[in-house]
Amino acid sequence: MSKQQLRQRSQQINQLSGKRFLITQPIIRNFTGSIVVALELAAYLQSQGAEVTVYTAFYDQPVKTAFENVNIKVTSSKEEPNFALQDFDYIWVHSQILPYSIVRRLNELSKSSTRFIFLHMSPHHDLAPDEFPWIYQLEDKLTNLRLVISEETASAQNQYLNFSPTLFFRNPAPVEFCEIERVPSKTLKKVLVVTNHPPVELDETIAILREQHPEIMIETFGETFDWQKVITASELKKYDAIITIGKTVQYGLVAGIPVFVYDKFGGFGYLNKGNYEVAKRQNFSGRGGNKLTAREIVNRLIDEYVPARQFALDHRPDFIDTYSIDNVVPQIIQSVPERCRIDFSSEYIKALLAAQRIAHEFFQALGMSRNFYERANSDIDALQADISALQANVAEHQQVIKALERDIDSLHHQLRKEAESSRDLDQALQTIRSKYLYRIARKLKLLP
């Protein structure tokens, strides 16, 4: 990096120091896309000297610990925070969730210098409706800058929004992933599968590798595999290749680790010069790629590893420049334009408050339902364990009973044999007693 580039980066980073950020996130509970973005963004901004507050409608474990571990201040709607517009230089919004106190003060917009940034992370209205503008004209009236995660998302969102200033926020990776020094092995030895919802062919891939390729260690990470945390650079650097989609792709790219893009939507296999741009436009989701069989995945994973490794290493500097949070966020903040806004009318604010209450209650109910679902599943698992233990005890007792029944049958058989022997003795005795000599001996009292 040249001296001029270093000066520019220093200026960009210095502009974050002392700035006040509010990041809004509808629900903070599981390690999923926008929640991890909120966590990493808050941690990065705070590391650069910014004051950061995260606001949410629902806040609970297991992610709660991750925010606490990096000392991020999180305020939930239950606390009813009394925020004012002038408390923040930037309000970064996910899913159009805003604190009630901010909404009530939108009649003061013309006097406020607070800049609003709205981030959209999904192109699918049916899968993530909250990622779309569900409050009429809110974003068009309020935002200074709109962010989208990919060209696919931009295309899907454009039909709902009129406001034009838009930049890409391509799931940037924390700095520690860019600082990984280990180079992947020249031959494939260790693979990590990162997925929350693995398709059948990926499960079969894991089974084939473990059974037929013991020389390749394969490990798994994600909700399905009961690994409930954010993957770290210290963990990722141990692997030679990653099978994944979405946000983990950027982790691998900036770390110089070959990435095999595949999950529930299908995928592209290893990223290379021929598929990288297409995959990037789809946010490395696997959409636009192909469905593969488990055998095809295994063969390509092994056979195409060497050129994929070279591609990852050759382009790592470019990937760091594109995806390092240390490059992306300062540039975005520097690009947020000023905007002349008019105050919101009292009627619109009332309607907006009503919509926000409905949304808050929905996300709170969603969080509580997930808690109930997991507790129910945990109780079911415990009951199933008890049933299994009881069934094992029953099976053990049945074996004991069968052994006792065999012993009883043996005793019956022995008793029958002894009874038969006794009858034979009685008959022999009767025969003896009927003999002439026996009767004489009895007469002479020589026998009893």
Image (spheres, rainbow, N blue to C red):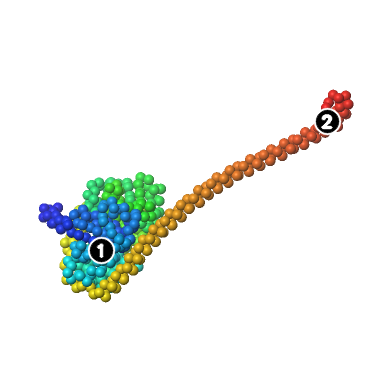
* Residue 188, percent from left and from top: 31, 48
* Residue 151, percent from left and from top: 25, 65
Q: Quadrant of residue 147?
A: bottom left
Q: Secondary structure at mark 2?
A: helix
Task: Please name the residue shown 28% across and 66% down the image.
Answer: 100
Task: Please name the residue shown 38% across and 61% down the image.
Answer: 368
In this view, the mark in front (1 or 2): 1
Q: Name the amino acid, label 2.
A: Ile
- Residue 93 shows which numbered tag? none
Q: Name the amino acid, label 1.
A: Asn
Q: Is 80 positioned to the left or the right of 444 in the image?
A: left
The residue that mark 2 highlights is 432
The residue that mark 1 highlights is 82
Residue situated in front as seen by the camera: 175 or 152 = 175
Q: Is 81 positioned to the left or the right of 294 in the image?
A: left
Residue situated in front as seen by the camera: 44 or 352 = 352
* Residue 303, percent from left and from top: 32, 51
Q: Secondary structure at mark 1?
A: loop
Counting other residues with Cα less than 10 Å from the Cα at mark 2, is it few (<14), some (14-19), or many (20 or more)? few
